Image (cartoon, rainbow, N blue to C red):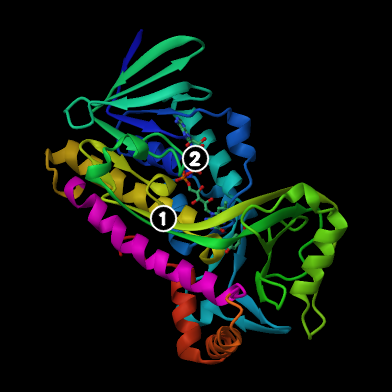
Amino acid sequence: MKAMRTQVGIVGAGPAGLMLGHLLHLAGIDSIIIEDRAQDYVIERVRAGVLEQTTVDLLNESGVGSRLQREGMFHDGIYINVFGNRRRIDIAALTGRRITVYGQNEVVKDLIAARSSTGRPLLFEVADVSVHDLESEQPKIRFTQDNTSCEIQCDFIAGCDGSHGICRASIPSNHIRIYERIYPFGWLGILADAAPSSPELVYSVHERGFALFSMRSNAVTRLYLQCAPDEDVSKWSDDQIWDELLTRLHSNDGWKPNVGPITQKGVTGMRSFVTEPMRYGRMFLAGDAAHIVPPTGAKGLNLAMADVWRLSRAVASYYQSGCDELLDHYSEDCLRRVWRAQQFSWWMTSMLHRPNTGNPFDSRRQLAELEYVTNSRAAMTSLAENYAGFPINE
Ligand code: FAD
Ligand code: PHB
């Protein structure tokens, strides 16, 4: 058995785990990050694209924002296409804040580079990960690497291992409460080598279902279609995907996405999920390990960043002053933001996807809501404020 010791043992090298390791490093706190996947897999996994101003500020202030400043795409607004009528919500004018499109995999790449330059451990392709003695002062992480059993003795464990990780699953069920809602649809997402034909995102409501136009760079478009949660993506030819996208994104002002070769496709189910509290003993959950939002509000990655900002401050305060206060408030403080994002993500999802109740009342009510949200300054301000995100300490 190979024995190691650190102040904070971090399980998972997604955005939450890597950013936590980075913030702890800046505070002079030692950590070991372990990840069960290979580095290339973690970097290439295509996921989020929209960063709140708060997330961008955090990346800049912590010294990992220089490529983002050069390559990020700064957006002042979004479009909502209501059955062919495309209307713009001017987020910058309504809130004074803007959003940035910069792929999650680029954020992960920048954080891995920052970690490597510190020389602090970041171990990929570990197996059989488990956590132990969580209620004690010396919790432990065990795993194997290259057929060697390893144990890390920690002061704290951070469970940053996403929605299917082992950390949350290691908490006795009578110590946590789970809140969950599964939606009766998913998103079929593609990446295409096509220049974005709109400088801003287009969320589109159509009789055949929701579609979203987004992007990754001046040459790459990211698009999504509402589909069944268990949709078999292999049954869709590229031509069928484009036909459906062009139909659902159709806009009476003549706008349409540019078509190009599809380079990646996949289906994601949609759910809302919250674990309370986000702590058990000396193990703290952060990011998707603690909560999931449907992607319609573009909040998941941003919540993960806000969690680890809070956790790094709480841990730093513990080492500086021996005081547990911020650690004791961690879960409650995170959950306020989490529930606000849950509400917003649920609302955006319900408003933009076609109701499948079969009751015409629901369709007419949805149209009235969309008319209100895209015409009333008060309603647009509310959407814009939530979409652009709140200050990190709220
Ligand atoms: P993850 O990214 O899931 O990272 C967890 C890591 O832990 C992974 O690398 C995993 O391999 C590792 N791991 C798992 N189990 C173990 C184990 N046993 N041992 C060691 N390591 C383990 N969010 C936004 O903010 N904006 C968006 O626009 C947006 N769009 C999205 C679009 C889609 C299609 C999807 C699916 C998600 C989207 N999200 C968006 C959500 C966002 O991608 C997630 O919220 C984000 O990845 C959470 O980061 P995380 O680090 O908490 O978890
Ligand atoms: C994305 O670009 O992947 C994206 C954008 C907005 C969302 C979800 C995903 O709401």
Is residue 351 on the magenta stretch? yes
Question: Does mark 2 have its CB less than 8 Å from ligand 1?
Answer: yes
Image vertical order of residue 252 relative to residue 314, above or below: below
Q: Position of residue 37 (x, y in %)?
A: 55, 29
Q: Quadrant of residue 249?
A: bottom right
Residue nearest the viewer, comparing 325 with 97: 325
Residue at left 20%, top 45%?
Answer: 327
Tell which residue pokes out farthest to the front in this image.
358
Q: Which residue is mark 1?
A: 273
Image vertical order of residue 330 relative to residue 247, above or below: above
Q: Which residue is mark 2?
A: 14
Residue at left 40%, top 11%?
Answer: 149
Q: Position of residue 385 (x, y in %)?
A: 44, 75
What amino acid type is highlighted by mark number 1?
Phe
Q: Quadrant of residue 121?
A: top left
Indicate left or right for 308 with 206 as reference.
left
Is residue 364 on the magenta stretch? no
Pick whichever of labels 2 and 1 is earlier in the sequence. Answer: 2
**Figure quadrant of the N terminus:** top left
Residue at left 51%, top 11%?
Answer: 146
